[in-house]
Image: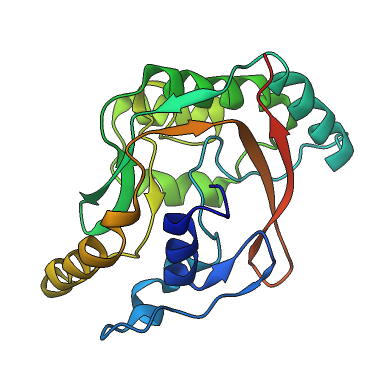
Amino acid sequence: PPPQAPWAQFATRWLGWDMIAGCDAPHPDLPLPIAKITDTPRKYGLHGTLKAPFHLADGHSRADLEAACEDLCATLAPTALPGLTLTRLGRFLALCPKAPSPELNALAANCVQGLDQFRAPPSAADLIRRRAANLSPEQDANLTRWGYPYVLGAFRFHITLTGKLAKADITPVQSALTQHLAPLLPHSLLIPDIALAGQAQDGRFHLLRRFSLSG
């Protein structure tokens, strides 16, 4: 998300990791155990996944991937998003579009399909781990073909804000985020670019490069 936006600045500090600057971010001063609440999503930083993390396939380099991202984005137009709203997804909290966005789903599908040659196949252990989540037939087929279950028809754009919360913690955390973050959320949002992120040796994700949607 745009780093200058107040909502993105708050959400970055909420998570505690600034993937753009590549450093820790101080948590907001709230009466909540934020470090524990955000421990799982912290390493990823503030982001909305379009194509899930993957290892590079043999014979491809980061430079090859960046060139392909640039070529792909030259064919794709900026995408309008109908605002964001704080949403409960099971026992997680995330920011989701206020209304369905076929344009955003198409953007994600283009990223999944158009860059798939750079993705190394998942390991047997990865497949076992994913299938332990009781995938639907569609999700399992996605896992086999695209390396990730929640793509194409099973895709739901979201910006993760918490790990899996205890049932007793969901309401107070949601109330705090509603009070402090919800008033900052945009009523509409234009996505002018996409970002390529990479995972460092310490497990944290860093912004590598942005690519303008110029099609």
Q: Position of residue 105 (x, y in %)?
A: 43, 23
Q: Position of residue 165 (x, y in %)?
A: 24, 68
- The relative height of residue 152 versus residue 63 in the rendered view (above or below) is above
Which residue is at the front of the view, 169 or 130? 169
- The relative height of residue 199 versus residue 32 in the rendered view (above or below) is above
Report the residue at 63% width, 33% height from top: 193
Tell me: 160 left or right of 66: left
Tell me: 92 left or right of 117: left
The tally of labels here is: 0
Report the residue at 51% width, 80% height from top: 26
Tell me: 58 left or right of 85: right
Can you tell which quarter of the image residue 84 is in? top left
Can you tell which quarter of the image residue 147 is in? top right
Tell me: 196 left or right of 78: right
Q: Position of residue 40 (x, y in %)?
A: 43, 68
Quarter of the image with the C terminus in it = top right
Can you tell which quarter of the image residue 163 is in? bottom left
Which residue is at the front of the view, 138 or 189? 189
Which residue is at the front of the view, 91 or 145? 91
Q: Position of residue 194 (x, y in %)?
A: 62, 35
Report the residue at 88% width, 38% height from top: 63
